[in-house]
Amino acid sequence: MALFTPSTTSGYSARITNPTNKAGTAAYFLCTEAVRADIAGALFAYRLNEATGSAFAGDFSNNNTRGTYRGQMTGDTAAKPACPRDAGGAYTLNGSTSYVSTPTYRASGNTFSIEVWFKTSTGGGKLIGFGNASTGTSTIYDRHLYLTDTGQVVFGVYPNQVKTVVSPLSYTDGTWHHAVATLSGTGMNLYIDAQKVATDPATTTGQSYAGYWRIGYDNLAGWGATQPANFYYRGSLRFAAAYTTALTPGQVTTHYNAGR
């Protein structure tokens, strides 16, 4: 039996698709690259990808302001983290002793952004915020992102009264989410997964004091109906940063797309 052999001059075509690959539409392939594009305004930028037992969180901003891991420090490399193309895993917080302190005592500002990737199945706890104590419990505190007991994300400042904007949805679904909050002369804005979910254009300032940025824990007493029972966050974190600028919606989207 004779076998048919295609001519070497025959033409063939094929199309291969990958609907889960977001790299083609993202401006940056890595979260590190996306943050570095806006690094001029960063106070610190932590990957939070260190190994279990590490003492310090490396800072890849221009300020070399490394953070200090407090309490139990566990690095999670078992599960696929946010920013999966960046090296390393995530930081897992136990909800009772784990948090990160920063070393620089600075004046509070009224133009800033705070950013973090988080994953949790438990409500409550501070994601990132500003307070007058570098460790322990601050007595003055605002400019923070935290979770309610039901898992909604809250952005709060205190210009002599509690001002908050709250996400309509809960995010205790055990998957990664990207949270950004900005304050500027145009008001308060809260973004979750690159979508603006809450805003207050009338609030343009926070409380005036000097202090430190904190990640994973600080005081939340007095924050009204949104105050959680536990001020320690329980879950995983990745890529936390604070900026002296208000990130634009376009910048927020760029950072989010790099982490998908």
Image (cartoon, grey):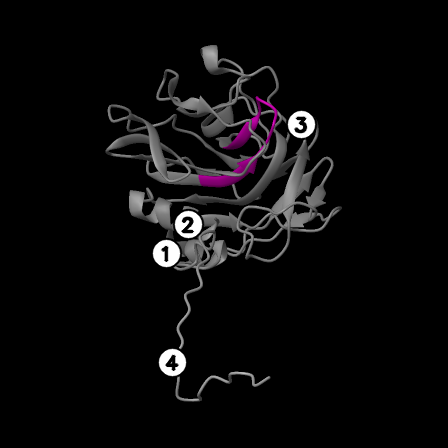
Where is residue 158, by image quadrant?
top left
Q: Is residue 36 magenta?
A: no
Q: Residues within 10 Å of mark 2 (few under 14, many from 20)?
A: many
Mark linked to residue 166 = none
Residue drawn at x 53%, y 15% as measured from the top left: 221
Check the picture and name the quadrant holding the N terminus. bottom right
Q: Secondary structure at mark 3?
A: loop
Q: Which sits earlier in the primary sequence, circle 2 or circle 4?
A: 4
Cα distance between the residues tagged 3 and 1: 36 Å
Q: Amino acid at mark 4?
A: Gly
* Residue that numbered label 2 is attached to: 257
Q: Secondary structure at mark 1?
A: loop
Q: Residues within 10 Å of mark 4 (few under 14, many from 20)?
A: few
Q: Is residue 223 above or below residue 214?
A: above
Q: In the rendered structure, are the residues bearing label 2 and label 4 in contact, judged by CB atoms less than 8 Å apart?
A: no
Q: In the rendered structure, are the residues bearing label 3 and label 1 in contact, judged by CB atoms less than 8 Å apart?
A: no
Mark linked to residue 11 = 4
Residue drawn at x 37%, y 15% as measured from the top left: 161
Mark linked to residue 95 = 3
* Residue that numbered label 1 is attached to: 25
